[in-house]
Each structure stands twice: as structure tokens, then as C-alpha cells.
Amino acid sequence: MIEETEFLAPGHRMCAGCGVALSARIAVNTAGKDTIVVSPTGCMEVTTTQYPETAWRVPFLHVAFENAASAASGIDSALKMLGKRENKNILVFAGDGGTFDIGLQALSGMFERGHKVTFICNDNEAYMNTGIQRCSATPYGAWTTTSPPGKYSIGESKPKKPIARIAAAHCIPYVATATIAYVADYQKKLKKALAVDGPSFIHVLAPCPSGWRFASDELIEVSRLAVQTGVFVLWEVENGEMENLKITKKIPQRKPVEEYLKTQGRFKHLFKPVLRKDVIGQIQAEIDKKFERFGL
Amino acid sequence: MAWRIIEGNQALAIGAKLCRPKVIASYPITPSTHVPETISEFVADGELKADFINVESEQSAISACIGAQATGVRTFTATASQGLALMHEMLYIASGMRLPIVIGCANRALSAPINIWCDHSDTMAERDAGWLQFYAENNQEALDLVLQAYKIAENKEVLLPGMVAIDAYTLTHTFERVDVPSQAEVDRFLPPYKPLYAFLDPEKPITQGSFGTPEHYMEFKYSQQKAMEASKEIIDQVFKEFDGKFKRRYHKIEKYKADDAEILLLTMGSMSGTAKDAVDRLREKGIKVGLAKFTVFRPFPAKELIEIAKRPKVLAVVDRNISLGHKGALFSDATSALASMERRPLTVNFIIGLGGRDISPQNFYEIVEKSEKILKKGKVEKELEWIGVKKEMIP
Amino acid sequence: MKISIGARVEEAGSSIKYKTGGWRSYRPVVNKDKCTKCWLCYKYCPDAAIEKGKDCAVIDYDYCKGCGVCAKECKFEAIEMVPEVK
């Protein structure tokens, strides 16, 4: 009945409607059998590898939270020395914590050294594994358990770190952004990433129903709206040429950002008890500025 | 086999090279930096067929070694002090994953204040990490212990990582005559690495680094402890085999004039050489003093210690480290091992040589003098003594 | 069972022993007549719990967690979420 092999088997404990689960499934199935998956500590790692079971049908390695890129570097070197490097993919699935924050140093080192590894950041914009704490991927204005709105707080007070641009600044052969709503775009980018001779990076927006506070069936719609409102722009940079950044999904008529914000409980304090036009206006202004600056 | 005049760091590097690791990942740190420098030259010159990864931290060095060893190759790295401390988290993971990685460690004090000189606080802080620990007295031992550490670590009854510790400067930067075995001789001693369980192969996809719940976690720790226990016999076997091939016999605890000693010094690392000299001088004066040097600290050679401790009346445990709030690490472990003896010797702990404070024969004369008083009185009045501390400087 | 050396899991994909179907409070039901076999639901299923059947999409109720993504995204309204009866 199933035509394609599922390399991430069901029975894993990721939440119903998990964006990371879908992103990982798309990516590992696109990469295929000759793939080694590395993952830092995080939601996906603990929910797919509970001893004595594993959801992985490809070789899988987890070491710690901060070092997936270093462990992947070691795999790349070892395979080379074994004469088994040809036709194999090394795919890292890291969360935003393991990429933006605690894993950034190791990631930068791996980029600089030029290991042939495809690093996928499944970004759900907070530390979900520990229970929705803010991180440097959390967007401005969002509620998390450590950026609660209150008398002196509008929620997260800092803008999101531009991780894909930071990756691109390393001038590695391939950097892209993607999201699970646009599967074909994601798959195309993955194939490009896997084909380059050196490091590649894909920043995937992977909404989290539990942490973003939306009904699980809204998963794709939330992901789509992120693109349609310009919150998340789909682009790629090839051969390290940042000046040739290419938008892969043009949005001729951008929707107002409210449409995205109001789908998620993590922004509900911006609408009730009083409508925070100032904060929403600022979020919108930042998006507008981004589109102007990059001539989108 | 050939004699060469080399420093301790080169002894570690040459020892590692002779074991043919396929991946070396390293980050420089004083005073172990000459190890990666020397190995990178071997790789650059084609003397060693390996991939040398210049990582961006010690944490990444050990992580890359874990990744490579989990893929199925022999790996090596070297570090010291803060570098080892930065590896701390990964040390537990390497042993929990049963990856027989071997590392060289230059024993250097831990900050603060920052200090680049010798003591054993860095490796002692990792004594619970599930690694085999070997301590060298001289550069010959440094080289030999690397060869033996791989052989022990990779034994199927063991499968635990190991570290070979050498004292900062007194060994790392001191040139000594070392008998360097030939590659062919080492090849006959240490076969090529074949992973028994740890590999990353799409033809046989396994998961490494799984999530262990309370249902299984204790069993994994029990297995590690069982492997540590099993390693005790394997260490003896490997030491014996090494002696057969290279004519140098190692012991977990090496005895020096210990058999008839009334006062026995317990030592580790390069201080043992100084202590042996002191023992010789004191013996000339008719003092019945001897020495027992711990070459292996993990697994702790409790059985051997009990045997050695049967005759002496005072054990003077000389620690080049301090577990702040208690005593030295060797003292703690030694006294707990002796607890089961019916008639145990008196035990006293001396802290010495922290942060590179020079250790002289005079220090050992003082230690023996204090031990003689204990012997005479038949009891220990002060269990912990600091040797060479300028107490007038303490506010 | 005997534990492995180093907590390795040697049986690939063994998570299938753990049936996540019990998590559901709503179950997706496919209307065979409306299904056009576009396989969008198959693509979007986070749990690999939809199979490409001969006549229509087939839900694997052993693993479907009932997230409802398939029903929501189906352009032909061929999937309905029905409350699970306890």
C-alpha cells in the first residue's frame, strides 16, 4: 500500500499536528536510504528514540544539545577515512535551541571547516522540549513561559535572530529558508542542499500547536500564513553569493500580519483585553521595512 | 624499536600515531598543544593516514571524536585543565555510549585563578565519568600507556574510553630518552579497530544515543560498572602481553621498596620519581619507607592496594589535588578501599604541588618525618596536611 | 529482554510497536467518492499515518493521532473529523 518508504516510522511520540515531525518526515524521505541523521537534544530526539525503540529507519546519532554540528563533522571525517563517503547524506535535524543558541558555536565551526553536512533547523520559535521558554528564535511580542506579558511586558521584547542570514554570512555553498506548507519548494531546496560539495543550511519554520497555542489542524494554515503575511520569507542563496539572494516564493499581495498573529494564542494578549495597535503596528512596520530593504 | 629524546607531549603524539587513529579532532590548550601540533605534522607528511579536524573548542573536539568513533573508526584527542572541564558533559556520554575513545591529558590546575602549571585536579574531577584513567611517571610511560589504553579500552569486555594523564611541564615539556617501538611491533600488539556495536551504516541502520527512561537507565549504569570491574583483569592481561612484546612491565600499582616498609607513600604521576629518590636517601638513614605508585586510578585497584597495605603501619597518601571541603581524591578512594581490612594501617593525607608548586625531595622528607611521628604515637592527630603552603600569606 | 551495549537500538523503525492511535479524540474518515487521490493529505501527515490506497487515501488508525491536518487541508472535503466514541 505505502509506495514510498517512510524513514521516520510512526509510533514516535511527537505531538499531534507537530510541524517538526512533518518537516523531518519530508526531509528524511527526500534524502532517502543512504542518509545518516544526527540530532541534538530536543523534542524530536527524545520522542523518536525512546529506548528500546526507535522511529528511525536510517542510522541515527544523538550526542548532546550543543554539539550536533561537531558530531556530524566527526561522521563526515570518519566516513571519508573509511572510504565510504560517496553517495551518503549527513543530515542534521536541530531545533531552534540547538541552532540559534546553544548549538551556534559548533554550527559556525562546521560551516567554516567545510564539512559536507546538510544542517536543517526545524524552528518552532521557543524551547518546546522544556515547556515553551523563549529563545533567540522567539518573535517579538510572543508569549512564552519566560517572556510572559504583564504590566511591564508585551511578551518577548527582542526581535528574532536572523539565523539563515548568519549562516549565509559564512559563504557556504547553499543556504535556504523553507516551511512545511510549501512541500515542493522545501524538497527542491533539500535536493540542492544535499547535492552541494560542502555545508548547507535550511531554516525551516515548523509551527508548534502546543507552544504557539493553535488547534493542531491549523498546522499548515499557520505555516502558509507566515509566508503570505511576509513574517517568514522563502529564499535561497547559492554558492555563498549573498548578493544573489533569490526569493523562491513571491508574495504579490501580502496579507496584514494580524491575520497570522490572531491564529495563535501566544499573541492573544495583543488583541485582548485591549487591542495593542502599537505592538502589532510595530511588527507590521518591521515586515514592511524588511520587504523594502530587500526589494521584495 | 629506537631510542629517541622526546618530550612528554611528543610521547603522547607518537604513541597515538602508532595506534593509527583515523580521526583526530583537537583544540590547542597549554600545556598539551604540542600533541595536536605534532600529530598534524604526521598527517601533513603522510606519516599518519588520518583526518585531522581543527575544531573550535574542546567540547567540539570530543564531540567530533564521539561522532567519528560512533561511525566506526579509532579516534584520538588531547587536552588539559579547562579543556577537559569543557569536555565534561561529553565524557559521560562517550562512556555511556561505550565508545573506546582514548585521549591524552596534560594535568594542569583548574581556574580560578587561572594557572597553566601542574596538578591533578582536572582529571580527578572526571574520575566518576566512566573513563579508564592511567597516570604516567615519565615519558616512556606516557607513550606505552597510550598503546595499552587502546588495547584495554577496545576489549569487548570493556568498551570504555580511556585517558592517559601526564604532568604539565615536568613531563609535557621535558625531554627524556624514550624507547619508541616500531610500527610493525605495535601492529602486532594492537590490531586494526573493528567496531563491535558502534557504527553508522545505512545497510544496518541503528540508533545511537537513545533516550533512556527509569525503566532501563540503572541497568545501563550497572553494565558500565560491570565493564569497569571486568577491565581490572583485562588491564593485567594487557600489561602482561605488553611486557612480553616490549619488555616493560606495568602494574596498576607499582611498588618501590614497599615490601618491608613501615611507612608507605602513595603517589601518582611524575612526583613518584622525586619520591623514589627521597625513599632511597631515607633508606640510607635506616628509615623503613617505601612507595606505591598508582598507574591506574580508574578502575580503582582496591584489591592490589589491600594487598600492599597489609604490612606497613602508616600510609602517607600524597595527593596533587584537593576535593575542596574534604580531602584529596586518592586519599578518599584509598581509605574507603581499606575499610574492609581487619587490621588497617594508619592513614594520613598530604596535599602537595597544587598549581605547579614545585615538589622537592625535602617535601617528602617532611612527609616521612610527620609519618614517623604518627608511627611513634600510634595515632593520627591531623588527617589532612598541606605541604609547602606559606601559611603566613593566608589572610 | 537483555539491554544493549551503550543503549543502542538495533531494530530500525521499532517505534511501530507503540500505537499512538489511542491519543485520538477525533478520527478522520475518508469519503471514497470525494477522494481524488491527489495525496495532499499523505504529504501533510506528520505521522506517516496515511497510505495511498487503491481507491482513496487510507488512514492508519493504529498511528493516526487525530491532529486533523488532513481534513483541514483536503481541497475536496473528502475527509471528515468524527468524534471517537468511548
Image (tube, coloured by chain):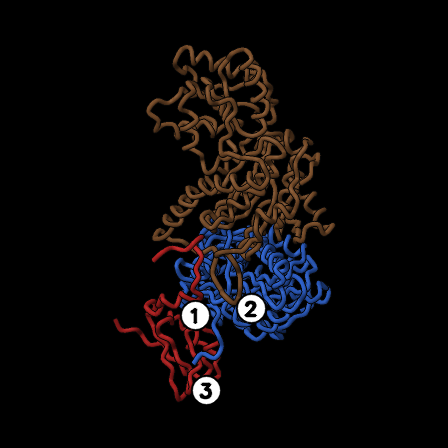
Chain colours: A blue, B brown, C red
Instruction: Tell me if mark 2 has few (under 14), some (14-19) or many (20+) residues whose alpha carbon lies within 10 angstroms of its own.
Output: some
On the image, which quarter does residue C46 sit in?
Answer: bottom left
Residue B78 location in percent, x, y? 61, 42
- Report the residue at 57% width, 39% height from top: B145
Which of the two discs, 1 and 2, sits closer to the camera? 2
Given residues B82 and B268, the one toward you in this image is B268
Residue A143 visible from this viewpoint: no
Q: Is residue B216 left or right of residue B47?
A: left
Q: Nearer the viewer, mark 2 or mark 3?
A: 2
Instruction: Tell me the distance, in whole angstroms, between the alpha carbons under discs 1 and 3.
Output: 21 Å
Give the residue number, with chain letter if any, for mark 3: C36
Is A260 or A21 nearer to us in this picture? A21
Contact (Cβ within 8 Å) of mark 1 with mark 2: no
Task: Specify whether B29 is left or right of B327.
Answer: right
Which disc, if any, is residue C47?
A: 1
Q: Residues within 10 Å of mark 1 (few under 14, many from 20)?
A: many
**Residue drawn at x 55%, y 72% as measured from the top left:** A30
Badge count: 3
Nearer to us in this view, B75 or A136: B75
- Work out whether residue C80 can be spotted: yes
Tell me where residue B225 appears, x and y as whole percent: 41, 43
On screen, residue B77 above or below B267: below
Tell which circle, 1 or 3, labels the residue nearer the N-terminal end: 3
Classify mark 2: helix, strand or loop. loop
At label 1, which amino acid type do we have? Asp
Please say if C51 is above or below A116.
Answer: below
What residue is pinned by disc 2?
A34
| Position in image of residue B53 (x %, y %) | 65, 51
Query: Who's the residue at 50% across and 34% down the image?
Result: B251
